[in-house]
Image: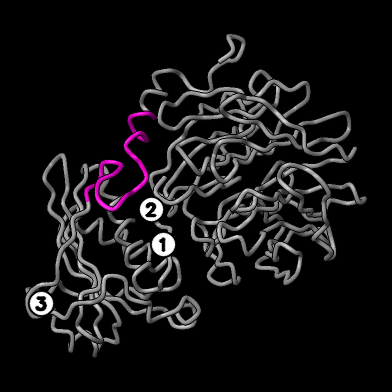
Amino acid sequence: MSPSVKPLIPDADADRLAAAFGRRGVMGAGIAGGLLATPLFAPSGAAHAQSAPDAEITVDQARTAPIPIVIPSLGSGMGQQITDVISADLGNCGLFRPISASMPTGRPDFATYKTMGARAMVTGKAEDRGSSIRVEFRLWDVTTGSQIQGTAYTASSQDWRRIAHVIADVIYTRLLGEKGYFNSRIAYVAMSGPRSHQTRRLAIMDQDGADSRYLTSGQWDTITPRFNPANSELAFMSYINNRPRVYLFNLNTGQQRVLGEFSGMSFAPRFSPRGDAVILSVTRGSGSDLYTVDLASMSRHQITASGAIDTSPCYSPDGSQIVFNSDRGGSPQLYIMPASGGDAKRISYGHGHYGSPVWSPRGDLIAFSRIANGSFSLGVMAPDGTGERILTQGFTVESPTFCPNGRVLAFCRQSAAHAGGAGFSSGISSIDITGFHERILPVGMSSDPTWSPLNQ
């Protein structure tokens, strides 16, 4: 770090953050990131499910009729807390209807749960061992009486929320046939103070809005955080020493570094799918160009020189293309071009100005914000520009970000400010990619959300 650049956070705080976030890692089949997963086989007399059964219920069916699932308490104290998080994860996504019940002793009497309308059921128990916790978990198909999943999780007791999110992900995956997204996080900008002098701090939380923590002190404003898909790192823009530039923030060490030395302002960063490069926008006179920076060598490569404002770039999941915003045609619109540069093709042709494009992890959609007739919309379209759909509207709805499985978008929703800033609000909401089940995340005044990959 350059001696002229003040740190975003003191070294003591960096050490504290390293202790808090360094425990998390990518989950494997057995041990990773401090969490041990051990299979539990079906008890005697229970029908056995196949190791990877096809989902009997599709996501579209679950949107119409959420899956009724019995989730008894896994125990008192921390066991009940884990149960509450599992139920909230499943209920808040809109695809499940959790049902409370007493934990059965021995093998469940499935006839009883059939009369309750349940399709699936959870059994198990949580054992608090002081510094560690062990959670036994079984998922049952109520209709057939077969065990779909059985796993015992052991981890540090401070990771109890992570175990709950992992169990919710397993339930989502086994019943719907696609990966869950509950064991993920959202980085965002936390806002405080009066409207005219707001402090903007980099922060991070679990995807459900819990366990929120500040990453920067607020001495300098920060905006547009972006996760590295390969490791625990964030890119963002900060106004340190009143010079807007892109920085990298290591969540494992709490340390930061400037991303390249450009003569103009650098902003709007986004990592490549492999996490080995960053694409960003750099001002040039009254316009801006797109550059890539290789993180190993710190070499940079300019990929646009249109004479216009080219900004908000985002890679396709395979890294072969980028979508970005440009006013090269006279108004801000969305364009696609090869990631190495070349001819750009316009894809947005609806009424209004388009911005904030982000590619779905599935590769099938691009989300965007649109301004028309003085109001904002949030929508999605195919990468070729077809099939445009508006999901939600408002005074300001912007900064869309996809969850790891591409099913849900988080975004910033703001209300109008009156005299002296009265009435202004800014928060983070989520919505299904079909426009279904919009909900507010309980995080307070905030903006600029970015969703992490799974298990980060």
- Which residue is nearer to you in this view: 299 or 226? 299
User: Is residue 173 positioned above or below 231 on the image?
Assistant: below
Q: Quadrant of residue 235?
A: top right
Residue sitting at x 52%, y 24%? 256
Residue sitting at x 59%, y 40%? 271
Q: CB of mark 3 within 8 Å of CB of mark 1?
A: no
Residue 165 pos. (x, y %): 34, 56
- Which residue is nearer to you in this view: 411 or 49? 49
Mark drawn on residue 107: 3
Which region is colored magenta? 17-36
Left or right position of 176 against 146: right
Can residue 423 be seen? no
**Distance in Å between CA atoms under marks 2 and 3:** 29 Å
Residue sitting at x 14%, y 61%? 125
For disc 2, the neighbor class at 10 Å (few under 14, some 14 to 19, many from 20) is many
Farthest residue, direction top: 3
Residue sitting at x 35%, y 74%? 175
**Distance in Å between CA atoms under marks 3 and 1:** 27 Å
